[in-house]
Image (cartoon, rainbow, N blue to C red):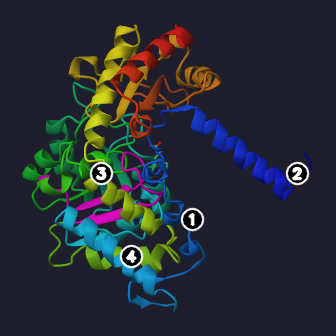
Amino acid sequence: MDKPTVDWIKDVVSRQNEWRSSCVNLIASENIMVTELPKFESPELYYNDFMHRYAEGEPYKRYYNGTKYADELEVEAIEYFKKKFDASYADVRPISGAVANIAVFSAMPRITNIVVTNSLPSGGHITHNKMGTMTRLIGRNVYNFPTGENPFTTDVDKAIKLIRKMNPDFVVFGKSMFLFREPVKEIHDAFPDLTIVYDAAHVFGLVYQGVFQQPLKEGANIMTSSTHKTFPGPQGGLIILKNDELGIYEKSIKTQVFPGILSNHHLHRIPALLAAAVILDTELTDYAKRVVSNAKAFAEALYNEGFDVCAADYGFTETHQVVVDVSKLGGGAKVANELEKNGIICNKNSLPWDKSVVKPSGIRLGVQEMTLKGWTKDDFIELAKKFKNILI
Ligand code: DSN
């Protein structure tokens, strides 16, 4: 077929749709929108006229006309998340978790210009680190939390010493490889005046449904997130502020979101975002619970099949993720490619003890999408057998 014709483009899209909907999708940062499930299927919640429109600014104070319904929905979404988290401010405009982070990290004061975050090998996100947004774009000096005896957690005593020594403007918790809770309460208790940002992107659905730590109750001042991982909404971002009655953070973050970073904020996703929240609160109230128990069952089953599942001494996982050290099987890249040939999609991942991020020795598996599609523990136990047949 000649390229690129419209027919060829349609054909690629149709091959993608067919392929990925027939795969076992285990990328921990992905999900399908809950509004795509046959039970709730309502394409108009995402594919709608809002996608052609602009609405710069805040609801009812826009720079454009024609926004009355966008305003109505955005106000409702803001109020919904504020109420859910007993928050003083919610911003649904960031179009991704990374954009939410850019807005927050650049809005914070610069006194020492130092930030403490999780390192990439210990699971930290690229936006929190030197090679990514925090230093490359925002120009802040980054120090990383020391890992604990369980290398998938932070050593609290050493973290306290580091914070005391470096006097950071703020610290960032939250990770991309995220197995266990973060020591938000411990660090808040040690430094009640320290600004804590919690990037909930991976675990937002679990936080939302109360099956994981509650960072804003534990002392985090700001929660950033994406809205499409364990929270099965459309791709997008979110900022939620707690304990900000004086508006210390709100004003600077709000102006960083707009006019600092965004022009349009992709209005068509707001109905699907709000619908996902409503569905989790009314219909799929046990979704996050099922996610965590499926992840535990999958980890245990892989371990029983002979895989080096990480954090075995610590119960494997408290989230949607399972991490496996596949260095003896040729490393993360080789294993992830082999799985893809067999219709299983996951990603290679650096492990805390890897010397370089170039040749990751692990794979990261997320159960949230297959759980949303109805998979149970038995399905994951079967999948572990399939992993053995393919890889060992
Ligand atoms: N880098 C993505 C991940 O965790 O897979 C999130 O942005």
Q: Which residue shows up at 46% across the image and 45% down it?
A: 31
Which badge, 3 or 4, comes first in the chain's sequence? 4
Neighbor class of circle 2 (other Cα within 10 Å; few <14, some 14-19, many 20+) is: few
Kindly identify which residue carries mark 4.
73
Q: Is residue 175 above or below residue 45?
A: above
Neighbor class of circle 3 (other Cα within 10 Å; few <14, some 14-19, many 20+) is: few
Disc 3 is placed on an element classified as: loop
Residue 252 vs residue 134, the one in the foreground: 252
Q: Nearer the viewer, mark 3 or mark 2?
A: 3
Three-letter code for the amino acid on which mark 2 is drawn: Lys
Which badge, 4 or 1, comes first in the chain's sequence? 1
Q: Residue farthest to the right?
A: 2
Kindly identify which residue carries mark 3.
283
Three-letter code for the amino acid on which mark 4 is drawn: Leu
Q: Nearer the viewer, mark 2 or mark 1?
A: 1
**Span of residues in magenta:** 218-241
Kindly identify which residue carries mark 2.
3
Neighbor class of circle 4 (other Cα within 10 Å; few <14, some 14-19, many 20+) is: some
Disc 2 is placed on an element classified as: loop
Quadrant assignment, res 355: top left
Which badge, 3 or 1, comes first in the chain's sequence? 1
Whole-number angstrom distance, CA of label 3 to CA of label 4: 21 Å
Kindly identify which residue carries mark 1.
47
Whole-number angstrom distance, CA of label 4 to CA of label 2: 40 Å
Residue 288: where, in percent of width, then height?
28, 42
Three-letter code for the amino acid on which mark 1 is drawn: Tyr
